[in-house]
Structures are given as C-alpha cells and as structure tokens.
Image: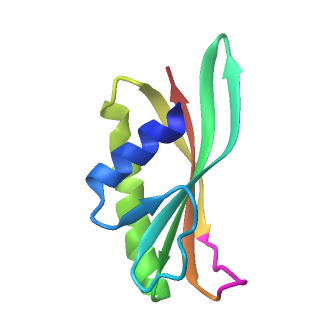
Amino acid sequence: MIELIVYNYLKDKLDILVDVEKPSPQTEDYVVIDKTAGSKSNHLPDATIAFQSYGKSKFDVMILNEKVKNVVESMVALDEIRGMDLNSDYYFPDVATKEHRYQAVYDIRYY
C-alpha cells in the first residue's frame, strides 16, 4: 500500500508531525498526506499524492514545503518506488481554519 510506504518514510525523515488526517487544532508545523488518485498501466500502479504543509506563517510553510519536497524526492532510493514527477506545487491556504498551507502534488510510480 503506497500510502503506508510514504507515511512511514516521511515520519522517519521529518522531525514534525506527519499524518493522513488533519489533526485537531495544532500550534506546531505538520504535514498531511492524501492519496487523491490512482491508476494502473501495464499492471504497474501509480498514485497521485498531495503533501499539505501547515505552519504558523506563510514563510514557515514555504520552507516546510521545500523540505517536504526534498524528502519526498529522496524516496526514489526505495526499492518500492520506480519513479515520480512533481505534478504541482502552490500556496493553498486553508480558508476554513485560516491556516497557512502549501501543497505539493506528486505522481508516484511504484511496484
């Protein structure tokens, strides 16, 4: 299951809270991962995964987003990952909670 691979990898490599659900109100920086799509071509699976970086300021989430992207891209070293592409990367404030958020979306090919 690609979500578990990604979750465990990020939890191991980042020194902040990583989860698959938005935690109850937080004051610290955190990252939420969410599989938004999946497909299969020639029996090989792909997943589109969004990495949402939350923080206290726009500057904080900008920096966190870059850190998250570096960690995500280092996952290509895993045997389970056969490649990835950055699909999109943008400031995406949470209008409901008024929290600062950046989102990086990757298309990940895996075994």
Residue 74, magenta (yes or no) = no
Image-quadrant location for residue 8 = top left
Relative vertical location of residue 105 with respect to residue 26 in this rendering, above or below: above
Q: At 30% across and 32% down in the image, what residue appears? A: 77
Please say whether residue 95 is one of the residues in the magenta stretch.
yes
Q: Position of residue 75 (x, y in %)?
A: 36, 39
* Horizontal relation, residue 30 to residue 22: left or right: left
Query: Is 83 in front, or is 5?
Result: 5
Image x and y of residue 41, in percent: 68, 17
The stretch in magenta equals 91-97
Pick whichever, 56 or 25, lies toward us: 25
Q: Is residue 38 above or below residue 60?
A: above
Residue 11 appears at what percent x and percent y? 34, 53
Toward the front, the furthest residue is: 24
Which residue shows up at 65% across the image and 85% down it? Answer: 97
Residue 45 rendering spot, x and y as whole percentages = 61, 23
